[in-house]
Structures are given as structure tokens and as C-alpha cells.
Amino acid sequence: MAFRIAFVLILLFGTIKCDDIFDITDEQLNELIALKNLTEQLTLLNLTYELSQGFILYDDSDISFYVYTKNSTDGTKLRYDQSNRLSYVAGFDSNLRTVFIIHGWLNYYKSEVNTIIRAALLALDKSFNIISVDWSRYSYLLYSLSRLTVPKVGKTVALFINSMMAKYTYSADDIILIGHSLGAHVAGFAGKELNGTLGTILGLDPAGPLFFEKDENTRLYINDAKYVQAIHTNSFLFGVNFPIGTIDFWPNGGCWQPGCSQLPIVVDICSHLMAYRFMAESIGNNLFYARKCSSYGEYESGNCSAGTSALMGGLNLNISLSGDFYLKTNLCSPYGLEDIGLTKQASLARNGILGTILGLDPPGPLFFERENITHMQLHLVIVLTSLFAYCRSDVYNRTDSNIDNISEIKTLIKLSDIKSNLSKISDMSRVFLDSSILFYVYTQSSIDATILTHDQSNLLASVKGFNTEIPTVFIIHGWVNNYESHVNTYIRDALLEYADVNVISVDWSCYSFLEYCIARSNVLNVGRTVGQFIKGMIDTFEYSPKDIILLGHSLGAHVSGFAGKALNGTLGTIVGMDPAGPLFFIDKPEDRLNPGDAEYVQAIHTNAGGLGAAFSLGDADFWPNGGSLQPPCSPSFKIIKDICSHDWSYVYMAESIKNNKYYGKQCSTYNDYCYGACDTNPFNLMGGLDYDKSAKGNFYLKIF
């Protein structure tokens, strides 16, 4: 219960409109400061405008400019008002193009984004002036506070550039700004200050949290320079997920990058940083060929092979091109694949110029160089992103009708508030694209997946071994999972070995890796997309909906429910494996998996009251070992035991496909079952593929 409460509290802070709950007097502000010192109450600190104003005493002099040339590689430090001293830097030439490199959050001028891009530039035969902007005085604050300073830092950069152009009669066309994460938006604000006259801005995975598509004046925008390019590498968490430039590149779909660890958060950090690694390599030897396409699914399907091509990154820019471009990359350096087709992979053994110069290793999980980046600060990265990535931009507006005292915050955290705010979650969600949901098709004759998009079910006939005369089983993963997660591989392998079925794994990882409340808000959309695919399949092949089985784990169970709703409950079977509990309610059957979603709905509860729902939501509900905690799971830590128990639902499901011996007895409680009070009651098999659809109610069993 304690974990559940903590979980809900975290979710709530991610869903309530921030400006609805914070109105703080001076006296309360002092109380908050004391709380901060005692307990590091980051949420209150982060959302209080007055506190942030006191925390940030911005001074242009805190921004430093480190100048490098081929003749001066150690870096000459200048202030914002010292551009007139550029002529004293050995090798500085006002007839050359000047590249500004602007780092992001928790970085400084010696961070990797600066060092590898600078090294790539200095390695070229052609010379450039290079200036690394250091705004670490503000980039090492809490994320939301750093975000607040972005316009000011951009203005300071513009002051330096403006005086530089005036002093040396320098052309704005010859100035290139390269910004990573928050630095991309700093570049945008610098461009705004200069009325869009700069030649080029390159935004490397522009930061997503607290930047919004409609607020063009508060982020990097297409008009901030004559040419704005964006490279998106982690568009579902740390980066923006919408087009932001003249031209937008989405390597590997833009969500996350191959070669990064699959651990949640780690994969996001790694993918976010891959943007500047791609950029650095493209400067030395640009083989990042991309194709203009409407979606990554269309690109992967080969439907854009004849489309317009463009090179991502680099400095030889074709400024006449615009739109969204997609490409694949290698797992490790060299990342560029050349223009070798959409499915053929270049050899990973090829040596790229940047790999030779810098000796780059495959991307690791973290690239924090400063010695004072501690484990606690990494924890803050995770917490702040989770809690505040989607707060409104008007978070700092105060009204007299808001909270009168600190204690009232507690009264907001209650069930009715969570329910009422569910309708608002969608307002904070990322833009949903049906084409981002992918369907991986497997048969006994085709164990290598064929990838289809939501509107390509008509292509199933081209999949080797796909048979419209046998059942088709859809596997739908849950939160922070994808098509390669264990829930898919365990069940898929069991089905292909022990059953005569078609198998389709649904991948909705572009949304499942979001903050939980945002992922939860997209469950309806994903379910409808799955329903659309199935309807196309039914219409094209006259496929019987009774022969379709949906197996969904956690949030995927509710995705299955919404797919069933979209098809008016005509599907044969849905099995929900420990259907997710947080933000799903017993009195809202229309907003979750429900018995009417298919002819037969079965639920397997393995962590009820923790990560799973604690109430019945199927025609038949199975509660192995009481349904709360599973015996194989470690007793040491509650959260670990919850996660382990939650996952055992799909382990049971996979085992039941191989040899189903999971007999459950219909009973009113687990205690009654244990004491033999239900021995004469009907039994039913949990899981498997052969269902007694007439047996309904709650069924209990012991395993182990």
C-alpha cells in the first residue's frame, strides 16, 4: 500500500496543472525554503516562480566564450562584451565561417558535446573559427530553473555575436550555431534576438521538457535563422517530438537509438546524447543519407526509397530542402550507413574518419564529465524529468484562488482529483501518430519479423507462412517495454514452438517509455490503432474476429481492451496479464479492460494492489498465490517484489501455452481456497489457448 500511495503521488504531480495548486505567500515561501533545506522538497522548489527568481540572479558576465582555431587549440576565454579581442586570438580570421557550440543541461564547455564537435572541426583541412559557449553557471541548476534562463543566455550570445559582426564587418550568413538539448533553444533565442538573420542553426535533439509545439516564441523555431536543422534522437522523453526546423531528421525513427542500453532512462540519456555524436561524425565524413518520408514506418517499409534524399548534419548544407527525413544508423561508430538502401546494413567494421581521430567507443549510458556530478544529481535528472516534463508553460502564473497554505497540498492528493484530472492528461500528451505503432509479424516459416504499420494489414498475405485459416495472436507489451521485451519474446517463442498460430507483436514503445501518466493517457489511442489494424485484416481476408486473441501485459492489457471496444466486443478472446492498476478505476469500466471487450476476457492477477489492478475486470479472473505477490520473487525490497510479481503474469502465460496445468478453483477468497472451502466448486484453466468460456468468476490457485 505504501508503494501504491507513493506511486500515485508521483503520478499526480505529473498530471495536475501546476498553476492550479501553487499560490504561496512570503511566509509560506520561507517555510518552503526551510523544507527544501531539511528534506529537499524538489517539487515545491521547482514550481515556485518567486523562489526561482530569488534563486536565479542572472548576470551576462557569467557566460563565457572559449575561442579555438587551428593555431590556438587551448581555448581563449572571453566575456560577452569582449568580442573586440577576437583579433588577438592566434589564427582567428574574420574571413572564415565561425561555429558556435552551445551545450545543454548539466554540461559545460569541456563536456563531450563541445570536445568531439570541436575536434571534428579542427581535423578538417578547411579552417573555421570555433567558439564554445559556457553557461554552466545556470545549466547546473534544477532543470526547470535552467530552462528559465534559456532566453537570457540566448540574448547574451546574441550580444556577443552582434558586437562581433559590428567590429569585424562580419556577415551573419557565415555564423553557424550548433546547440544540444537546452543549448538548441539557447541558439534559437540568440537567433530571435538577431531577427533571424543568422545563416544556420543546427539543433541537436532540442530539449523537450517544458517546451511546447504551439509556443513558437519560447523555443527554437524555423524563423530563428535562414536555415534551421533539427536532429531528433530521443523524441519521446528528453527531446521534442515535433518538427522544429526548416528540415528535421529522425534517425532510427527519432525515439531512441540502437546501441544504447535497454534500461529505462539510461536508454533515453544515451539516445539524447547520440545527436551530437552523429553531428561530430557528419562533420568529418558525412554518410548520413536520409529520405523524405511521412513516417518512419513508411520509410522502413521502403515506400520512400525513391523520395528526396538529404544528408543529416555536416556543414555542407542544402538549404533548399525542407520537411521530415528518416534514416537508419549503425549501432556504433562509424554510425553513417551511406546511401545503401533501406534494409541493407553497412558493415560495423568500417573505419570512419572520426572514429580514427578520436578513438570513439560505442555509446555508454552516461557522459557526465564534471567531478561534482554525483549519483544524487543523476537521480535528480530522472526525478525532475519524470515529474515536470509536461507541466504547463503557465506554471508560474499565480492567482488568489489557489492554495492558501502548504498543508492544503495534501488534500489535493486524493482519488477524486486523480479521476477528474485524467481528462486533462491528454492535453499534456505528445502528439499521437498512428504510424508510430508498429506490428512485428512472425510465423513458423518466418521467425524473422516482418514490420508493418497500422494501415498495412493488407500486406499480411505477403508474409511467408501467414495463414488466414488459423488463429492470430497479438502480444501487447506494457510500460517501459518494447517488442523485444521479455513479455514478447517469452510468449512469442512458446507460441511458435507449441501452437499453430500467426503471431503479431505490437510495439508502442514511442509512448510506453513516456512518464507513466502520459503513457497511460495514450492507451486509448494505441488500442484504437490496434483495432484499426485488426479491422483491416478482417475486411481484407474475411478473417473471423473469433479467431483473434489479444494477450496484453500491464498497460498492454488495457490497450487490448480498447482495441476490443473499437471492434464492438466481437473479438474472440482477450487475456490481460496483471492489468495495470495505477490510474484505472473499478467504477470506470469504459476506461479500462472490461468483460464486454471480447467474447471472453480473462485476467491473471499477480501483483494486485501494487502495479496491477486489485479488482476483477474479466469474465474469469485468476489470482495465483492470492494474486498479490508471487513466491519466486525476492522478499528483500517491496518495489523489487512488486515488479517481479507483476512480470510473473507473462511467465505463467508462456508456460501455460507449453503445457497448461494451472487449474484454478472458483472461490470467493484466497483464504477459503486455502482452507478447502471451495474444493467442490468448478475449476478453470488459467492462460493457455483453450478456454472454457462458460466458466466465469474469480478463480484461485497455488503455484510453487
Image (cartoon, rainbow, N blue to C red):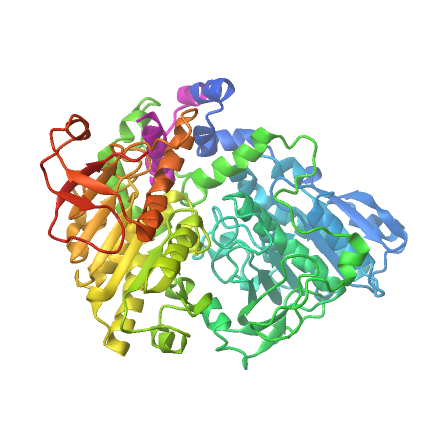
Who's the residue at 52% across and 52% down the image?
239
Observer able to see residue 415: yes
Q: Quadrant of the C terminus?
A: top left
Give residue 662's position: percent from left, percent from top: 26, 43
Give residue 165's position: percent from left, percent from top: 75, 58
Depth check: give the residue in front, 255 or 501.
Answer: 501
Depth check: give the residue in front, 310 or 564.
Answer: 564
Give residue 459's position: percent from left, percent from top: 38, 76
Q: Quadrant of the N terminus?
A: top left
Residue 29 covered by magenta stretch: yes
Q: Residue furthest left?
A: 680
From what the image shows, is residue 338 above or below residue 416?
below
Depth check: give the residue in front, 526 or 19.
Answer: 526
State which quadrant residue 405 falls in.
Answer: top left
State which quadrant residue 91 falls in.
Answer: bottom right
Give residue 557's position: percent from left, percent from top: 29, 50
Residue 227 covered by magenta stretch: no
Q: Position of 74 compared to 550: left or right?
A: right
Observer able to see residue 617: no
Q: Position of 453 compared to 105: left or right?
A: left
Majority secondary structure in the magenta region: helix
Number of marks drawn = 0
Who's the residue at 47% across and 46% down the image?
210
Depth check: give the residue in front, 487 or 407.
Answer: 487
Who's the residue at 19% across and 43% down the image?
621
Q: Which residues are magenta?
A: 1-30
Q: Position of 641 compared to 413: left or right?
A: right
From what the image shows, is residue 121 above or below residue 50?
below
